[in-house]
Amino acid sequence: MDSSPKPKSLSTNLYFLFLLLSTNLLTLFLSSTLYSSCSLRFLTSTAATNGSDIGISVSDLSMSEPSQPLPQSDEFLRFVSGQSLPFGFNTNFGSDTMYSPVGRACTLFSDELRRYMTYKVNGSCPDDELLAQKLLLKGCEPLPRRRCRPAAPHRYTEPYPLPTSLWTTPPDSSVVWTAYACKNYNCLINRKSKQKGFDDCKDCFDLEGRERSRWTSKRIENGSLDFAIDEVLATRRPGTIRIGLDIGGGVATFAVRMKERNITIVTTSMNLNGPFNNFIASRGVVPLYLSISQRLPFFDNTLDIVHSMHVLSNWIPTTTLQFLMFDIYRVLRPGGLFWLDHFFCTGEQLEEVYAPLIESVGFNKLKWVVGRKLDRGPELREMYVSALLEKPLNNSW
Ligand SMILES: *[C@@H]1O[C@H](CO)[C@@H](O)[C@H](O)[C@H]1NC(C)=O
Ligand SMILES: *[C@@H]1O[C@H](CO)[C@@H](O)[C@H](O)[C@H]1NC(C)=O
Ligand SMILES: *[C@@H]1O[C@H](CO)[C@@H](O)[C@H](O)[C@H]1NC(C)=O
Ligand SMILES: *[C@@H]1O[C@H](CO)[C@@H](O)[C@H](O)[C@H]1NC(C)=O
């Protein structure tokens, strides 16, 4: 692998420290000025009701964008309204009322939210996946549409049986294609060579291509960024890695490889210009439609392994990344593994921001490999980090 970056001048270091601080301070500043009325109301409404009110009141939600105080759709207001529990006060809840969860950020995009929540209850949902995904990616998560039937393919074809399904391109008729540039799997398989421009996981749908060999290398080179699954599993007692999560797992080849080893992996994915969730499900592993800003829906100290490749990178706001890293630590059981696969950033960012951030969470480092990413030229000093981290057996707090 490449030599480590040259020592940098003090001024560069200070510059990045400044960047780090100013980004954080700016975030704090923005959140406490722009959204202050909203968050204050949120705080007062929860504080004032001393635990009997576990949600945000309807008036908070419908009025949180002062410049556009347009009313929300009736269905949205019904959705966020408290519902009385039929048997009254429940000690588990500490309340006699139940609220449906809705991302507070939904109300920051009231036009889109109104469009999204205007639909015929007990009818067909509008075929508007792009709108839904945009809202979700901005933090309107969980999405509040609950009472309609989604568009379904005209002549749905059932999936192939296992184990054929794991490595077979699913039928086109298992997908509603409206939201994607491609209208069939053949187009997705060929888009790497035939379509210009960037697409997330552009070559992933080709199961005969790169997907075939991922994480399976038998000969592990010292210092390679590509760890092999069997090499990682060999760090634990056989059979003790059983369940886990792959964050932003593309077409879930990681989960498929683990399934072949009798390990159950759930794969989070968005549908960025491709039916990733359908494809993953058709292969016969579980997709989870969840953004990286959402708290992971697992209980503390439960998962044996969390993996993530090419997703956790410098495009993520630093604070968001820190929330996520702590959340990964939370859901891993003691002795569980966090395989951070090809984390991307520049050399300076790695030294000044990301390495300290990752180290501060409390993992033990079993493996830490830094390598240059040279495809866009060495002068950009782009780096990858692959790491195998362990939640300590005895730690924590
Ligand atoms: C809420 O606060 C009031 C006084 O402020 C108190 O009398 C009441 O017991 C509290 N309720 C709960 C559920 O804590
Ligand atoms: C939904 O619509 C169908 C037919 O239009 C009706 O039979 C059914 O009762 C409705 N269900 C609800 C929950 O309103
Ligand atoms: C890999 O590198 C480490 C230290 O750099 C060394 O101890 C080890 O023997 C090497 N392993 C192989 C297989 O070359
Ligand atoms: C997976 O489990 C099945 C059924 O228990 C077993 O026959 C098979 O050998 C296992 N495969 C591996 C790779 O452990």
Image (cartoon, rainbow, N blue to C red):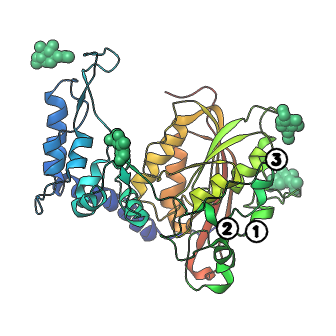
Q: Nearer the viewer, residue 169 or 106?
A: 169
Residue on which the image places disc 1: 210
Q: Secondary structure at mark 2?
A: loop
**Disc 1 + disc 2, Cβ < 8 Å:** yes
Q: Position of residue 188 (x, y in %)?
A: 64, 74
Q: Earlier in the sequence, mark 1 or mark 3?
A: 1
- Characterize the local packing of mark 3: few (<14), some (14-19) or many (20 or more) Cα atoms within 10 angstroms: some
Which residue occupies 42% across, 56% down?
318
Residue 204: which disc?
2
Which residue occupies 47% across, 47% down?
324
Q: Secondary structure at mark 1?
A: helix
283 is higher (above) or lower (below) than 373:
above
Q: Earlier in the sequence, mark 1 or mark 2?
A: 2
- Characterize the local packing of mark 2: few (<14), some (14-19) or many (20 or more) Cα atoms within 10 angstroms: many
**Disc 3 + disc 2, Cβ < 8 Å:** no
Is residue 324 visible from the viewing direction of this image? yes
28 is higher (above) or lower (below) than 182:
above
Residue 105: which disc?
none
Residue on which the image places disc 3: 230
Q: Amino acid at mark 2?
A: Cys
Q: Amino acid at mark 3?
A: Asp
> Residue 92: which quarter of the image?
top left
Spatial CA distance of label 3 from label 2 is: 22 Å
Q: Secondary structure at mark 3?
A: helix
Q: Nearer the viewer, residue 303 or 189?
A: 189
Of marks 1 and 3, the one in the foreground: 1
Q: Position of residue 90 (x, y in %)?
A: 30, 16
> Residue 174: which quarter of the image?
bottom right
